[in-house]
Structure formats: C-alpha cells, structure tokens
Image (cartoon, coloured by chain):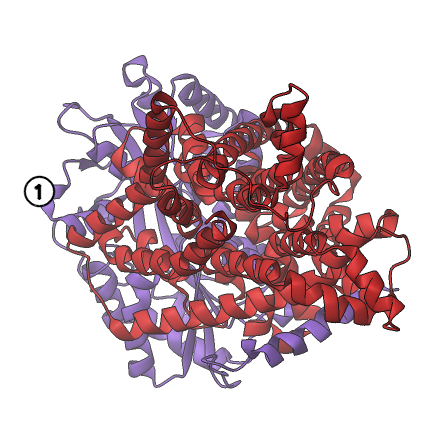
Chain colours: A red, B purple
Amino acid sequence: MPSRRIPAGLLWPAGVTAALALLPVAYLAVRSVEGGSAAVARTLLRARTLELAVRSLGLAAVVTALCVIVGVSLAWLVVRSDLPGRRVFGILAALPLAVPSYVAAYTWVASFDLEGFAGSVLVLTLCSYPYVYLPVAAALSRMDPATEEVALSLGRSRYAVVLRQLRPAAAAGGLLVAMYVLAEFGAVAIMRFDVFTTQIYTSYRAGFNRTPAAVLGLLLVLITLVIVAAEFRTRGRAAYAMRGGAARRPPTIRLAPGPKALALAASAALTGLAVGFPLASICYWLLGGSSARLDPADLSAAVGATLGVAAAGALLTTALAVPVGIIAARHRGRTATFLEQSTYVGHSLPGIVMALSLVFFAVRYVPAIYQRWPLLVIAYAVLFMPAAVGAVRASVLQSPPVLEEVARSLGRTPLQAVRTVTLPLALPGVLAGAALVFLTAMKELPATLLLRPTGVETLATRLWTETGSGAYAAAAPYAALLMLLAAVPGFLLGRRSLEETR
Amino acid sequence: MSLHRLVAAALLPLALLASACGGGGDGAEDFGDDSLVIYSGRNENLVGPLLDKLKTATGLDVQVRYGDSAELAAQILEEGADTRADLFFSQDAGALGALSAKQMLAPVPQDLLGRVPAEYRGVDGTWVGVSGRSRVVVYDPRTVTAPPKSVFELTDPKWRGKVGWAPTNASFQSFVTAMRVVSGEDKARQWLEAMKANGTQTYPNNVEILNAVDAGKLQLGLINHYYWYEKVAEKGAGGVPSKLAYLPGGDPGALVNVAGVATLKNSKHAEAARKATDYLLGPDAQKYFAETTKEYPLIAGVATAPGLPPLDSLKGPEVDLSKLDSLEQTITLLQDVGLV
C-alpha cells in the first residue's frame, strides 16, 4: 500500500538524484537574477515570447495527440487483434527511436517540399510515437480480461474499459513526447518552424547577455511542470487500477476484412514513413555525392566512444532512477511528488542549456571531471532521467506490494524487502528503461559537443561535423551506423512489447 | 545547505560512480598541461587538415576542440577565468568581439597584428583576422536574369516570397550589424520589416539557403561566398545550378567579415599561442585558406583562388569589424522585428 513514510535508504539517494536534476534550474536562477528584474521583465513581456510559447505549446499538443492516437492504435492492433504480420509491426514499432530527429527532418526536407508546422508535426510524430506505443503495448498485454468481460456482460463496450485502463500508460508516454517536443531544436530548425527553444538558442548565440536565455529557460521549466502536474492528476485516479500479471491472456479480437485491410495498410504506411524512408534516404546519400569517404579508424573510434558513453549513461541514469522510481510507485505525499517531478526538469530543457549549466558548476566545483567522461555521463543522466524513472515506477507497480509485506513479516527491513523481492521482479522493466536511455543517449548532440573530452568524437558529433560543412555523402556512413547500432536496443524494446502476446 | 555544498554533494559521488562504472579512462586521452588547447568554432572538415599542418610545422602539442563558434564563446564565458581554451579560432568577428568585451582576451603581439590590414583586426588589438569571407547574393539563373545590385532592392514586390535568409545565423547577424552601423538603426529596422512583409523565407543556415536556391524553391538568397564554392567542390559544377552575385557600391550586403583568432588572457601557453597565430598568418596557412576553403587570404603576397574576384575589388561597406561586437543591439533589433 502507498504510504507516507519513505525509508532513509531510499530518501537520500533519491535526494541526490533530485538535486542533480535541479542543477540546471539553479544555474538558470543565478543567471536570471544576475541580469536584474528589469531585464527579466523585458524578456518576459516581449510579444515574441508569448507568440513562441504558444507555437511551442501548439506543436507539443498536436504531436502528443497524434502520438497517442498512433501509439495506442498500433499497440492495440499488435497486441490484441489478428492483424497479419503483427509481430513484425511490433518489432518495427520501436525502431523510429533509432532515427535521430535531425536526420529524419533533413531527409524529409531534402526530398519533399515540406516545411513549417506540418513538416515539424510529421517528423516529430514519426520519431516519437514509440514513447506511447511501448508503455501502452506493455499495459495491454498485462491487462486482466476479466474486467472486459464484466463490461460486456453489463452491455457496455469493451473499449471504454480498455481505454480507461490504458490512460496512465498513454499519459506517461504522452508526457515524454510533450517534453521531448518542447525541448526539441534540431528538427524544427531544419523544418524552419520557430519555437520557444529557437529564442533560447538565439539568445545564447549572442553570447553577451545570458539573462534572456536564462529567463526563457526558467519559463520552459515552469511550463513543463504544469504539464507534469496535469499528467500526475490523470495518473492519480487510475494508477493502481492495473493488476500485476493477469492470470489469463486476453482474447484476440478478429478484425472484419474491411477494417483489417485498412489497418494493415495504415500500419505498413506508418512503418514505411517512420523507418523505411529515413533508411532509404541514408542509402541514397551513401551512393551519391563525391564527398563520400570512409576512414575506418575514425569510424571505429566514434563507434567505441558512442557505445561506451551511452552505456555508462544508461547505467548511471538507471542507478539514479531506481530510488526515485520505487518511491514514486510505493509512496504518496509531498516529498514523493517533489522527488519524482524534479527529475523531469532536465528533460524539458534544450541540451545546450543543460550543458552550459554543467559547464558553470563543474568548472567551479569539480574541475577534475570537467571535459572528462564522467561529466558527459552525468549530463545524459540529467537529460534522460524521466524515461528511466518511468520504467522503474511502472515495473515496481507491477510487482504486488503484498510480496514485500510478506518479506517484512519474515523479518526483513523495508529496504531489504525492496532489494530482495521487488527489484528482481521489476528487473526486466528496469532494463527496458535502461535500453531506452541507451538509445536516446547515442543520438544526443548539443550536450555532447560541449562536454565531451577534447578530441573525442561520437557518431552524432561526426555527423554534425560532416553535415556542418555540407558533406552529406560523407555524413551518411555515420548516420547509417548510428541508426544501425541504435536499432539493436530498439529491436529488443520492440520484441519485449510482444513478449506476452504469443 | 549552501549552494556550494549542495552542488558538491550532488556531483562528487556521481563523478566517482560514473568513473567506477567504466565511464572513466577508457579511450579518453589525458592531455598534459603542456598542450595548446584550441577551441575551434570552424568546422573540422575545413580546418582540421590545416591544424594538423600547424602541429607538424610548429612542433607544438596541440589539442583541438571543435564546436559552433557562438556556443564555444558561450562556453568560454561560462568557464570564466578557469577556461581551458588557450586560443579561440572563431568563424566570425562577432564572437571574438564578445570575448573581448568581457576582457577575456590578451593583446595580439604587434608584429603579428601588423601583417593584416587594419580593417580585418580588432581595434583594441585583442584579436586578428586570419581569413576573409564575403557576403554575396546567390541566385537561380533559370529564373533570375538580372540579380539585384543592392540588398535594399530585395524589398521589391517582384521578389515577394522568393528570397531566403537565415536570421539566427551569425554571419547574417554580422551583416545586419554592419547595416546598422553604416546605414543607421532606423534604416536597418525599416529594411528588416520590409523584408519580412515581403515574405522573405527563413532558413536555419547558409547551406540550406543554397540548397533551396539550387532546388528552385528560392530565386535569391543571402549567404557567404565560400559555401557556393564548397558545394561546387562536393557536387561538381554541373550539380550546382545557382550563381553568385557580388554586390557593388559599398552595399552592406557585400560585407567582408573574417574568421579570426584570439589568445585567452588566462592562457598559460602564451608563447605557444603566439607561435600558432604566427603560423596561421604565414604563407602556408594563408595559401590553404585560398586554395582549400576558398576564403580570402589576408596577408600580402598570397594569391586568391582562381575564379574569385580579388579581395580589394569587393566594394563592401566601410565598417570597423570590431563594431560587429555590437551584436547585442542587433539581436534586440531582430527580436523587436520578430525575426528571432
């Protein structure tokens, strides 16, 4: 049962995680205060600020809504229907996560006359619907069919019950999408759609006066917290409705021929656009252009650095997320809410803001790790914490608290009970979260550019170098390798979404 | 808890954990204190080979950190007195001016400064240009027979929706700064507003504008000259349908900006930085700029690449490049107009 009292063994590590996640906010506050209240007011009251905030929120709302529709529909088709080839679609469903959004945006702009709001919506939806698909598919396959049968026996539609039970999973995924879109810069810049982050970047580019950028960053944090709070309310009513490990597999719904053909066409089109198209574009780059050249030493060094730092990032992020995730699943109250919500802050900020805040603190307080691996790994942890916390929380929720209570009645301390009973049960879900962080960290660019050790290149920074000088053919091998490597955890995540669907 | 202790509490255990988890050591070279650290805001593909030559020629132990000029300048400002940079190689004069304004730069030795014409170096002597780049109009000869002779003509209704610019791009902002300085704040504002009203298309950078003109999506674009020559080198002359128009008559659209270097005041390697600057202002490096990156060499006696109009034939506006550090006013102007 959720309780107020949090064991100190969880509270302190979670506190460290929260403090780390809030560092960027401290930095933004320092920089904002430095500028004086007049400068703060001038930035906030500018008409353009409101305009861009509205554009950002509009984009986030539309992309999130589309991702929820696409993610939930696809998950339902894959897990519950007799859609032909559903296993293949299920495995491919997570792969768009392997495509960096800036690469996806470029491939669309280069091939079609597609820009602005519509282009941004298309690219961001295609890149981020897996954030909704994955948790919803997992929730669907765990769902107890008994509740549906009750609904049917009472003359109600089964879908009302299903959708109600999916709400927490869809909302959690939608939250990740919304925050991802708010912080996104590369794809919207290529699509020529100015948003809030554009103004933050421009202020930093000016280099002289960092107050406006900091004020805008704080505003972005505030907007995010409002969205996070809304998601918490959705969750509050339904979070514990999910039952851990249903005894029976839900029945497979047979689709009528017409809807089946339609669903098949839609799924094929989605997969083609989200995975096939960027892949085909990269192949086209690989073949064309005279800048194509390949230095195996450079390539393998970049692969090593990418895998190493992304793996370390996934490890650290998961380690930091475990205490917060357990608290979020098992405890209620202000402290628990604060600890969980604070971990969402970093994810909502553009990478450069987060990176500059770590430059600021590391140079002053821990110069020994500045421009060394550990700081970059910490940056990934701050940026990608929410996905890991969400995964830990969801999988801890699946393991029935009664088992912990039994362990405690046998003389274990609360912390021992968590470690010996709950965590082993939750492990597969926690690892899935780690895979998601690993995948995301491999593609990260702005923080990597500023914080990596001097002379070290990842696949993403090589890609940036090549495209920055207009050498698209030379960029292609790096883009292809990045997608190929990221496809491995993507494949595992997709397969996992099918595990209970045999 | 004080901020200091909170930060130390949050960062230190993590640093240890991260290194223990295999984040530390592997593949990360530990550079000695003897290395000259260059923060390069210029692309590695363009200047990497040059900086390799610099290492060989000077025998210096050089470490280069590549990034975006403005982001690296912001990074140096955040690093403050503890900056790791010895030498900053910036893509434009504005970012150098930014560091100079914050008193972060050391004076360039007089003998080096003297090799470059006065208009291509900081008036306070804290930075020096090493290569020149001209603003140009790129146009599509398939649809444009008479390219404009001034950026002020671009507000003509006949170009409505046909022109591309990159308001967030540093080179563009330097050009607007030049227009502010030369033609006055009001005229610059009027021009920006008229351009906006004329449906001028916004792009993230020069490369995308050039690609859009080549693809026939735009008729005109405001870019730097070398992007066009680089694309010709990549795609071959047949793959680049667009052409360049150099604006005459002191037009702000023909601004000649520089890429330049500066030594950080807190650098412990002032002598090494001097040697590196000396190399970049020597005939080898200047020839490299002319031949490889198609930029303008700035020292006497090094020829411009064939096909480019000579530097002294370019009739850009007469503007003190140091004044390009009044970028903040330009950003404010661009924000007022609603462009950034």
Residue A391, position in %: x, y? 63, 54
Q: Which residue is mark 1?
A: B238
Query: Does B28 sit left or right of B120 as displayed?
Result: right
Viewer-proximal residue among B194 and A347: A347
Viewer-proximal residue among A26 and A163: A163
Q: Residue at x 14, y 36 (%)?
A: B241
Residue B158 occupies quadrant:
top left
Residue type highlighted by circle 1: Gly
Residue positioned most to the right: A5
**What chain letter is assigned to the residue under label 1?**
B
Residue B325, position in %: x, y? 52, 48
Label 1: which secondary element: helix
Viewer-proximal residue among A193 and B213: A193
Residue positioned most to the front: A153
Query: Does A214 sit left or right of A38 as displayed?
Result: left
Position of A427 relative to A254 (above/below): below
Query: Does B269 sit left or right of A46 as displayed?
Result: left
